[in-house]
Structure formats: structure tokens, C-alpha cells
Image (cartoon, rainbow, N blue to C red):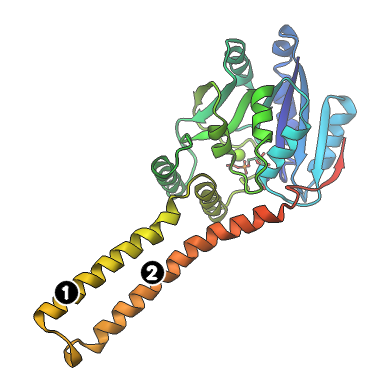
Amino acid sequence: MILSIIVPCYNEEETVSLFYNEVEKQEEFFQKNSIEPEFIFVDDGSRDKTVEKVKALREKDKRVHLISFSRNFGKEAAIFAGLERASGELVTLMDADLQDPPALLPEMYSYIQNGYDVAATRRVDRKGEPPVRSWFARRFYALMRKISTTDIVDGARDFRMMTRKVVDAVLAIKEYNRFSKGIFGWVGFKTRWLEYENIERAAGETKWSFWKLFLYSLEGIMAFSTAPLLIPLFLGIMFLIAAVVLLVISIVLGIGGNEVAVQVICCVVAFAAGVQMCCLGIVGMYFSKIYLEVKNRPKYLVREEF
Ligand code: UDP
Ligand code: MG
């Protein structure tokens, strides 16, 4: 049985061989279960020596494969490319930086053997992460639980082992704006969760700035919830009610003419205009996503592969 190991790499020259060596330590487990590993390194437009490092591995191990993108398309595109290329009956996604310990592979495999379709992982703490980032991450998951019907698990990592059925289901989702955590939740299937404590990356540094993560979380919200589109409707109704109430009050009390201060009117008008602009912004965000989907551009372009 082939196990495809998909590894998205963006400037990972320091970690590629560390990663390979660590997985190789599982060789005994592979042989005992007649598993043939297939390494698929997806180079996401790295500007360092990542590709050379993968080529060096290929020299000594023909089970190593590479898909090299023409530029940086993002981890989501790398995952998709890897899944398309994977030939295994079983597929696992792993980061190159060893934050996803290969030592968990035997346990994951045992769950699949016991009838689960997916063995997924989540980290139970956020040790080594800036506190502000953790706080925002927690808020994001709490919000998603409220506004989305898709189950998006707090602390879930992309590190998971899946059967072919699940991989095909994920590949059937063709959307351009991909949010894997949501996609995995959306496809469902019988999932067993493994928990482990956060491990810091082996070498190099994280590719995610706070801003990139923030935009990614907006991506997640828009991809898996339409609740924000109800905000304009809600605010509109509030404003209508307030307007009627004010009208009644002014008729009853006989307020009118010059008695209402010009400043008050200016403030109310400016406030209402601000609310309208924000609402337009929410609609615009969804509109831009539709625009990108409709263009139907390829999710990635390949420069080189073997
Ligand atoms: N990655 C990628 N494309 C990107 C950013 C990251 O393929 O644009 C890869 C990266 O090489 C690593 C994995 O995605 O293997 C996770 O990235 P990172 O470790 O920087 O994220 P973190 O673990 O800090 O969330
Ligand atoms: Mg990492």
C-alpha cells in the first residue's frame, strides 16, 4: 500500500533533509505494515535552495517527488497540488518544519486500520506563540463556532492521514479561495482526533505574519459563513425603527423647524453614511471572492516536477 506524504515547502532549505531523516526513522513501521511511502515535496516558489535540497534527496531515493511552483501561490495551493499528484491509497499532509511529528504516523495508521477515514491532529496548547496571536486565534474559532455550520476545530492542524475516499472528496471541492480547515470539516467522514502539545519548528522561521494570519481568518469566515451578509439587513432594520421612533417623538412633542440643532442632524447623517459604507464593504468582500471564483484561474502553475 502506498502512503503519499505531502509536504508544502516555502523557503525550507534548512528543514527539508531534517524532515526526510525524521520520517525515515519510521522505516521499520513502514516495512512491518507493507507501506510504501511516497514523498511529494511541493515547492511553493521558494527563493532559497529548497529545490536543490529535494533534488539531492531524489538522487539517493527514487520515492522522492517534487512539484515546483512558478511562484509563491500559498500553502493552500500547495496542499491541493500535492493531493492531485498523490497516488497513494493513504495520504498524509505534513509541514516541513517537523512541527508535525512523524512519530505519530503509526498511531494514525492504527486508527485508519480500525475503520476511521481520517486520523487528524490538534494541538492542545499554543506554547511558544505570541500571546496576542493566541488570543485572536481563540476569538476566531469562537466566532466561527457561532456563525458557521461547518465544524472548524480549535487548534486543528493540517497534519492528518486520510483514505483515498476522503482525498477524492476534498479534490472534488474546486473552489479557488481555499480554507483547508473548513474544507476538511465540510467533507465530514469518520474522524479520530489525536492531541499533542505544540512543538516549535526545527529550524528556519514561520512564514505567517500576524497580518497574513488575519487575512487568512477573514478568508475562512467568508468561505464558510454568510452570516456577515446579514449585518447590513440587521442594521438597516434598526435604523428604520429608530427613524420611526424619532418621527413620532418629534410630532408628539412638537419639535421642528429650527429647534433641532444642526450639529445633531449632521452627526446622525454622518453616522448613517458610515454604517452604509461599512455594509457596502461587507458586501464588497464577498463580491471580490465571487469575482475571483468566476475568473476560474488555475490554483497554481508548475515550473518543474519529477
Ligand atoms: N508554506 C507554504 N507556502 C506558504 C507558507 C508556508 O508552502 O506560503 C509551508 C511551510 O513551508 C511549512 C508549512 O507551510 O511547511 C507551514 O508553515 P509555517 O511553519 O511557516 O507556519 P506555522 O507552523 O508557523 O503556522
Ligand atoms: Mg510551522
Residue 121 in the image, given as x and y percentages of width and height: 54, 27
Specify the quadrant that holds the C terminus. Answer: top right
Which residue is identified by label 1?
248
Mark 2 neighbour class, 10 Å CA radius: few under 14, some 14 to 19, many 20 or more: some
Mark 1 Cα-neighbour bin, 10 Å: few <14, some 14–19, many ≥20: few
Q: Secondary structure at mark 2?
A: helix
The secondary structure type at the circle numbered 1 is helix
Towards the viewer: 292 or 100: 292
Q: Amino acid at mark 1?
A: Val
Could you tell me which quadrant the N terminus lies in? top right
Frontmost residue, 258 versus 49: 258
Q: Quadrant of residue 248?
A: bottom left
The reply to whether residue 93 is visible in this rendering is: no
Find ligand 2 in the image and state its quadrant.
Answer: top right
Amino acid type of the residue tagged 2 in the rendering? Val
Q: Report the disc number at residue 275.
A: 2
Q: Residue at x 62, y 11 (%)?
A: 113
Q: Is residue 3 above or below residue 240?
A: above
> Mark 2 or 1, which is nearer the eye?
1
| Quarter where residue 102 is shown | top right
Mark 2 or mark 1: which comes first in sequence? 1
Indicate the position of residue 91 as horizontal and vertical percent values: 69, 25
Q: Position of residue 299 (x, y in %)?
A: 73, 47
Q: How many marks?
A: 2
Task: Please say if 197 is above or below 295.
Answer: above
